[in-house]
Image: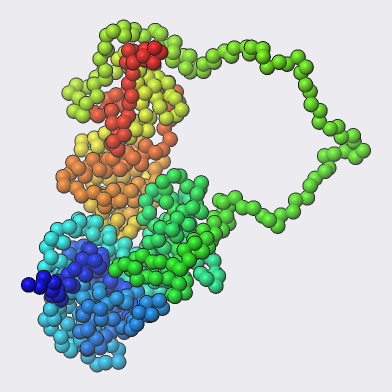
Amino acid sequence: MNTIHLLPDIVANQIAAGEVIQRPASAVKELLENTIDAGATKVQLIIKDAGRTLIQVVDNGKGMAFTDARMCFERHATSKIATADDLFHLTTKGFRGEALASIAAIAQIELNTKRAEEETGTRILVEGSQIKEHAPTATQDGTSIAVKNLFFNVPARRNFLKSDAVELGHIEEELNRLSLIHYDIEFSFYHNGKLMQQLQPSNQKQRIINVFGTHFKDKLFPVELNTEAVKITGFIAKPENAKKKKNEQYLFVNNRFVKHYLLTHAIETAYKELIPEGHKPAFFIEITVPPATIDVNISPTKIDVKFQDDRMIYAFLNAAVKKTLGALSLVPQIDFNYNPDYDFSAIKSREHIKPPTLTLNPNYTPYTSKPEKKNTVSDSWQQFLSGLKNETVKSHCEEPEKLAFTDEPKEKEEIIDETQLKCLLFSDAYLVFLWNDALHVIDVKAARERILFEHFLHALENAPIVIQQSMFPETITLSASATEIVNDLLSELRALGYDLEQMDRTSFAVNGTPGEDESCNVQQIIEQFVEMYKTHQFLHKTDKNCAIAKSLARQKCGSKLQIASELEQQAFVKQWLQCQVPHISPSGKKVVKSFMSMEIQKLFE
């Protein structure tokens, strides 16, 4: 009996859909690319329930004829290529003929399309790859395609989708990737009937500002290089605007958004020593090369590309970015045309110049013993050690009680007299102190993160932080999806001392900030809140509060802490000792290392 057989078309299409359509944003990408290939100058993206219920794209492109509208749902049906050689002369987004067939296999589709030269258009209804209707209809020029109930016949795939906020963020990202390179096209983005984004045709810099907010206005600097082999244009941001995440890194090759490790490395290397380790610069770079020198057909999603000469593109891109940074006087440059005029005016005329002389000690011998150096101890260490001598230390035979570090909340708060603490700040990173007959060394940054975390968590659950009202409120601008998330977090942000009021679709007025925080970058704090929210699935309010408190604590503990004086050090230790879980930071880092008298004695045995 034969065991090999052909798969039914619907099964083959569903398998292909698994490669091309992973989530609603994947369908959005394919539909938007089709509108651009159709020559549209005005595009509407309409979403319901983060793409679960509806994904609709309406454009004013050239539309399709009656038969073409039916053929576009067949696998590998395309108007973009005819031979394999055409793959190396591509100027369009799509070419494989998989997108619409894949989407039709896992959704219900309504297509209305019309060419300008024809009197009537075409209407097609598809459900699970089956054509339900194909008929003439009255419709406007261009194409409107609605994808309804995505994954309706593949419920297992639907269960893998994340929250609406996360899926909406992915959809917005796909829109950004296209709108940032096709800035001559008008884009409108609606979610659940609400206008999220309206992008008018503009130049590239203005489109970046319109997408990411007016705070980008003074951050962008042009990159330009033009050779026979490659053309590089775009913008990079100042080094001080680098972030720990790659949220604002956009690389385009021949008008196509791509991810290319080597080229990203070329840009980041140009910033070397200008940004902190682990931070990523923002950039919006467009690379244009002859189509024959690049292969875009190495993955179904067409997001990866391969160059004939990666190293050449790397060198040109690195040089172009360095040139821009150099123009900002950020990268040291060598001027090979510089011819210094040496100044000999300091030498008086007819002055006798004495040659240098060497003086020798005839009595020196290396075999005589050197005088012993005195063991110098800094004043602060000397004071600390003298303080230790006055403490009552138990015998090494007796094990003194250690600090009670447990994960359980303390039932009764200890009464701590900070004046009894003997503290020493070591290397600005560690605080040494004596407590309960033991020597403790704490990591200042980790301890501060723990203190701040519990402070913010207490504010969210019990006692909101006092708000200092602003006389002249500043304005922050966010992306469309970030605006949705911030609206969900307004009550939590207010409990933490941030009073925000929405002004328009993507702007908020900052009416107040925490009274305890004199200088804070609200834009950066809110953006990090949004990123934290996107990467967490909150099942309970407690989990949400913990994640918010953790996010803010991480941001705040990075700023410089003033604990130079002994009183400041004592107060800091007291705060830390009163934490519910003092021995570990919210990030999971060990905070303290304790030494008993017996352990210290063993160091000298």
Q: Which residue lies furthest to the left in this view?
A: 1
Q: How many numbered circles does the render carry? A: 0
- Residue at 35% x, 38% y is 515
Answer yes or no: is residue 247 visible. Answer: yes
345 left or right of 470 in image:
right
Q: In which quarter of the image is residue 197?
A: bottom left
Measured as percent of width and height from the top left, residue 85 is found at 38, 80
What is the quadrant of the C terminus in the image?
A: top left
45 relative position to 288: left or right: left
Identify the residue at horizontal 15%, vertical 85% (top origin): 134
**Residue 465: in sight, yes or no?**
no
x%, y% of residue 422?
A: 39, 16
Q: In which quarter of the image is the N terminus?
A: bottom left
Residue lying at 39% horizontally and 38% vertically, measured from the top left: 558
- Residue 233 lies, with reference to residue 135, above or below; the image says above
Which quarter of the picture shows residue 182? bottom left
Whether 36 is drawn above or below 409: the answer is below
Q: Is residue 370 left or right of residue 71?
A: right
Q: How far across and how far down the image is residue 297, in percent?
A: 34, 71
Colour style of the rendered protein structure: rainbow
Q: How far across and down, in percent of the image, does residue 6 sit?
A: 14, 75
Considering every residue shown, the one lying at the far right of the view is 350
Pick whichever, 221 or 472, lies toward us.
221
Q: Quadrant of residue 250?
A: bottom left
